[in-house]
Amino acid sequence: MIKKRIRYIQRYQDILTALFHYGFGHLVRDLGLLDFVRTPKRKKDPNYYRSTAERLRLLLEELGPTFIKMGQVASTRSDIFPDYLIKELSKLQDHVPPFPFKDVKAIIEEDLGNSLDSIFQHFDEEPIAAASIGQVHKAILPSGEKVVVKVRRPNIEQQVLTDLAIMEDLIGLAEERLVWAKRFNLLEVFHEFAEALKLEMNYKEEAQNTERIYKQTEDEEDVEIPTIYPSFSTKRMMTIAYVEGIKITSIREEDGYDLSKVAETFAKSLFQQIFVHGFFHGDPHPGNIFVKKDHTIALIDFGMVGRLTPEMRQNMALLVIGLKSRHTDKVLKALKNTNIVQDHVNQQLLRDDLDALRLRYYDMPISDISLGEAVQDLFAVANKHHCKVPSDLTILGKSLLSVERIVSTLDPNLRIMDLIEPFGRTLIKERYDPRRLSSLLKDEIVDSVELLRDLPRELRSLSKTVQHGKVKVEISVPEVDRLINKIDKVSNKVSFAIVLMSFSIIMVGIIVGASLTSEPTILLQLPAIEVGFVIATLMFIWIIYSIIRSGRF
């Protein structure tokens, strides 16, 4: 840890000084890192009157790409962080200038092994968008197809890895020294975030995600996923078909758009990804959704995706059933099945809180219930009881909220529960489909047969282990350190008593032996009896004192 701080001393100072500037100096002090801070200038802090959440957002924006991305991921974790912080972090934007065209040209030519003029028929030098990880340029392929090219910022990987190393150090230190940091399990959340960010920097991952969503939506006539051009894509750059359209929240009826139809098409497409395929767009905000003149919905930017296993989708169906019927036990069962509820959780208290949540929605018409908010509320209750919510489920909650917000902007009268109901019915039918149940039964029978087949061999192995006396027994004792300490004290006292007894026997032997010989010895000339008596008396008094002081006699 110390080596890490020395290695990244300059960046450490930047981060810790920024913490001071935005009013988080007490955190640096509690972490014991004041020596790494440059002395801040003594002037009126313009951030003094801002809220804590706003100062945190400004801090993350100043510290750059890694911290911005961390804040954006944190804004999806309503199961961990409070609402006021989530709302502020949701405002995080990548306020970064574009990097020079010469760097763009160098990266493309190095990765594709040819000159830019040979690779593209035309390439716009001015980017159409710039973000913390990379920027986007319009171009034309030699075949005449219009494309956009995403190019990663030079040296961004090293910068991100450095920041991740520092963040891991600081969060680990916080969990050691700050109670609230340990309660939030920040290190575990950080590791999820770090892996997601590393994948996002690798454009090959995004290309694969896009290809998978493309295949899922082939049969959907009103949905378009842009084509990826693998021959013009690498880890640091990605070439995608250009989408001509308008941002979904910018379309107007006076321009000829049917807002209700667009909203329904968009929502159903996302629900199809979530509840049918289990692989879905993890960041469907308006900037990633475009509408074409023919009302086709175009989805872009699949750097963040969510994954739901068939079992998780079935449990989501059970959750929807519980919410719709306002049945607390069904909701609790769904949470258990998704491994959100661990063994250490007090299930009675959790059930009480879920019942209180049920009562909140009891008098509300089902069509007025926000599924996204309901799921977020469930995750908040789970977090209160220190349950672990899988990251894919938090991405799901965020995606549902994004869909609902866009739908309500386009058509406030369109109820999300009405759109999701057919998918819920399908999941319910699948859950109780005899073919699925028979398949599960078949798997259970196969597993049981395998177990029975292996049982004799396992029993023989266990028998041999017992015969050789090699059975390992693990004993768990509460407060084992204190117990060992007590045992040490007792053994020391026993040893002390044995030494005293041995000393007494030796003294007696010396005196008796000396008295049986007629020749004078040095021992007879010494006051052995007096000396031995004094030593034995002192040792005896010490033992009695130790016993009385312990209070156990």
Image (tube, rainbow, N blue to C red):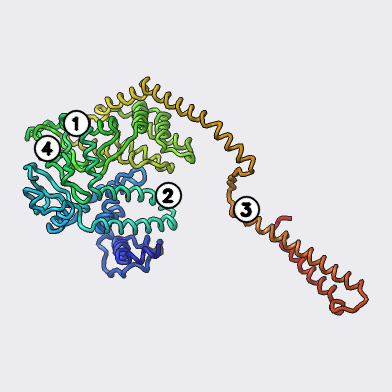
Q: Upstream in the sequence, badge 2 or badge 4?
A: 2
Question: Is the Cβ of the residue at disc 1 closer than 8 Å to that at disc 2?
Answer: no
The amino acid type found where label 3 is placed reads: Leu
Front: mark 1 or 2: 1
Q: Is residue 454 left or right of residue 149?
A: right
Q: Residue 543: in sight, yes or no?
A: yes
Q: Position of residue 204 (x, y in %)?
A: 23, 46
- Mark 1 vs 3, N-terminal side: 1
Mark with earlier residue (1, 2):
2
Alpha-carbon distance for marks 2 and 4?
44 Å
- Image quadrant assignment for residue 219: top left
SS assignment at label 3: helix
Q: CA distance from mark 4 to mark 3?
A: 72 Å
Query: Identity of the amino acid at label 1?
Result: Glu
Q: Earlier in the sequence, mark 2 or mark 3?
A: 2
Q: Earlier in the sequence, mark 4 or mark 3?
A: 4
Q: Which residue is mark 1?
A: 218
The amino acid marked with disc number 4 is Ile
Residue bearing mark 2: 183
In this rendering, the label closer to the viewer, 1 or 4: 1
Closer to viewer: mark 1 or mark 3: 1
Give SS at disc 1: loop
**Label 1: how many Cα within 10 Å (few below 14, some 14–19, many 20+):** few
* Tag 2 secondary structure: helix
Callout 2 crowding tier (Cα within 10 Å): few <14, some 14–19, many ≥20? few
Q: Are marks 1 and 3 in contact (CB under 8 Å)?
A: no
Q: Tell me the residue that label 3 is attached to.
A: 483
Residue under circle 4? 251
